[in-house]
Amino acid sequence: MSNIYDTLNPEQKKAVLHDKGPLLILAGAGSGKTRVLTHRIAYLIEHRNVNPWNILAITFTNKAAREMRERVDQIVGYGSENIWVSTFHSTCVRILRRFIDRIGYERSFSIYDTDDQKALMREVCKYLQIDTKRMPERSLLSAISKAKDELISPEEFEKRAGGDYNERKYAQVYKEYQKRLKSSNALDFDDLIFKTVELFMNDKEALTYYQNRFRYIMVDEYQDTNTAQFRLIHLLASGVNEFGKKEYNLCVVGDDDQSIYKFRGANIHNILNFEQAFPNTKVIKLEQNYRSSKNILNAANEVIANNTKRKEKSLWTDNEDGDPVNYTLFESDIEEADIITAEIKRTVENNKANYNDFAILYRTNAQSRIFEEKLIQRNIPYKIIGSINFYARKEIKDILAYLKTIDNGLDNIAVKRIINVPRRGIGLTTIDRVNDYALLNDISFYEALTRAYQIPGLERTASKITPFVSMIEGLRSRLQQDSYNLTEIIDDILDATGYLKEFEDLDTEEAKDRIANIDELVNKLVTYVEDTDEPSLSGFLEEVALVSDIDNLDESSDHMVLMTLHSAKGLEFPYVYICGMEEGIFPSYMSIHADNPEEEIEEERRLCYVGITRAKKCLSLSSAKHRMLRGDIMYNKPSRFIHEIPRYLMKVNMPEANMPEINIPATPRYHHSQKNYKPFATAEPKNFAGSNMGSLDYEVGDSVKHIKFGIGTVTNIVMGGKDYEVTVDFPRFGTKKLIASFAKLTRVD
DNA sequence: ACGGCCGAGCTTTTT
DNA sequence: GCTCGGCCGT
């Protein structure tokens, strides 16, 4: 009789059948770890009589959670809906929604995203008179985030600061920031973990409740956990069984070679020292890769072998050799984007693949722009993941701020965001006055608004505030009615505020985009209401706060995807292009020039390993001899990672379109400073007339049209530091020197 | 109060 | 190159 476990290889099987006690699965890329996790869950339920209710599976992204949920549902016969499959953050939110009142917050807390954090930090800095030139908000925020990742409280931070002036200032800011979060009844992302740990440390009852509930815990991507997350898991897994004994039924899956989130506080020691933290850990290595061709996997192995600090392992595969890894050195970033998109289009049109078989990966989001241009030109369907989160768009944030205001009047940042959106004639002076009054009387900003008439100095503007308050109250009371359909709330807000009207009157492309986005938000609300047992406004806001772009990756429609290497973790594609393989781009300038370059470069190399191992069938790497970055041209050497792949695994291609060579310095160097480096600003400016370098669609001798000067003749084109300087003779206005990107000249025939 | 303009800073990665 | 915040002028 065959069963589902027969399809597993011996190591996978060992992991699945492991009984009790801590289990560390070191799973190489593509070794079927999700399969092992889901089968293990099924095994526990079916053969060990574990109640599904007692199982918790934690992932990092909603997408991973959703996938695991689906697969668990497929193989677990009965009761799979009682298994908790969720991300760290949503797990914590669920716990906190139930128990956070025990540590002094209200259960209707808001979740602040990066934008909200920045807004709050600005207020804090203003209040504490911090010189944000010397201490930028973002470094304050990142220090606080780091502290929270390490479970360092404001008090502890202050203690550690000692006499150091800067550190004390940071401590003061951290304290005030936290105080204001609390009075807004809000948590930031890091708080979600931090406060859950705090809850468990302070409330035995809550801890015991969850320890009893989660008898079996699985953690995916364990190498990316930070100290707070480790602590959380440790607490949860330290429950005792019916004999009063700790079992540590904790199963973690990870790959130290794929640890790429150190900057976010991920602590590699969590995986490297797991066996010390949990005695009697059983360790199982999954080393057979089922995803990639031999050539691709070998390339990955060769690259990662250059790292020193890693658990020794060797991935192998039974798959075919496959094609060699492609490498192309392009002339420029433009050529790179142009030729790669052309190649993709050709492959699809020759019926060799679909668009959703392709991914373009890059180190930084900024690199997506040029690809996007070319994809539009070529009419290739695509989706860019992560450049701007849907929920970070202005119009969406505005609507969400209304929803938050209705849901949690304590959320000061939300109220302040929309108090004058759309314009109500309530300006900064008024807001400051209300704010002062709120602080003085220890009430929320919204509460202060309701007493507008009592606030000194607001005689005139109070009449503008009260309609706002009654509008919010009106929406609130409507929401409370039993017959109210939650899906209507956004429309009601739009009606009550006239928010849409502003855009409709504008009638520009941008306004249309924004309206479409708002429609999309309404769709998401409708979907939420339909898919949820007991839909609520807070429930919707929570879901919205915790999704990232990658979660919305839709595999059903035929488009290719573009994303950063980080976002690509956990995904796989038949065809993968990794672009911008250049020193200074990848590995990044920051890592090369860090205080501890060795360590930082190793992290970059792991990122490279992650990228390479996304590819199943065909991997193409590329670099450009020069590219535009922040308006400057940079010359970069091909990445060291290219040199780490042995020549016999690679096919080095020549770009098909041969652009004429232009003034490439003999030794390509990486140039960071924009100020000191002007590649073409020599004593004698080089004349590029006739060269096809760059993207001007006119050259010397052409007639061009200028918006103000009319039609004229181009007499010279010069490359300045950042831009083309074009000289044009206008019959009516004389000779003008114009900056190409600014003047927007168009060729006329 | 508000719109428009200018300069600074940014870009490494994100739940 | 872009975006955001601050400043200025109405």
Image (spheres, coloured by chain):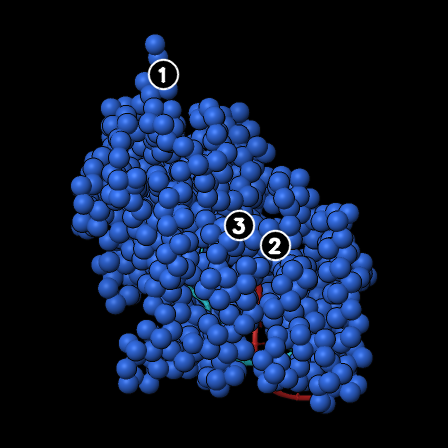
Chain colours: A blue, B cyan, C red
> Tag 1: residue type?
Asn
Q: Secondary structure at mark 1?
A: loop
**Are the residues flagged by discs 2 and 1 in contact, CB closer than 8 Å?**
no
In the image, residue A141 sits, relative to residue A210, either above or below, namely below
Residue placed most toward the observer, A486 or A703: A486
Compared across the picture, whether A129 is left or right of A248 comes to right
Residue under pointer 2: A538
- Please give the name of the residue rendered at 68% of the width and 68% of the height, measured from the top-left corner: A418
Q: Residues within 10 Å of mark 3 (few under 14, many from 20)?
A: some
Residue under pointer 3: A547
* Mark 2 vs 1, N-terminal side: 1
> Tag 2: residue type?
Ser
For residue A492, say whether it is visible.
yes
In x, y percent, where is residue A414? Answer: 62, 67
- Please give the name of the residue rendered at 65% of the width and 60% of the height, measured from the top-left corner: A407
Residue under pointer 1: A3
For residue A687, say whether it is visible.
no
> Tag 3: residue type?
Val
**Are the residues flagged by discs 3 and 2 in contact, CB closer than 8 Å?**
no
Residue placed most toward the observer, A8 or A201: A201
Question: Mark 2 to mark 1: distance in Å?
Answer: 43 Å
The chain ID associated with circle 3 is A
Compared across the picture, whether A577 is left or right of A348 comes to left
Residues indicated by labels 2 and 1 sit on the same polypeptide chain: yes
* Mark 1 vs 3, N-terminal side: 1
- Please give the name of the residue rendered at 46% of the width and 77% of the height, measured from the top-left corner: A176
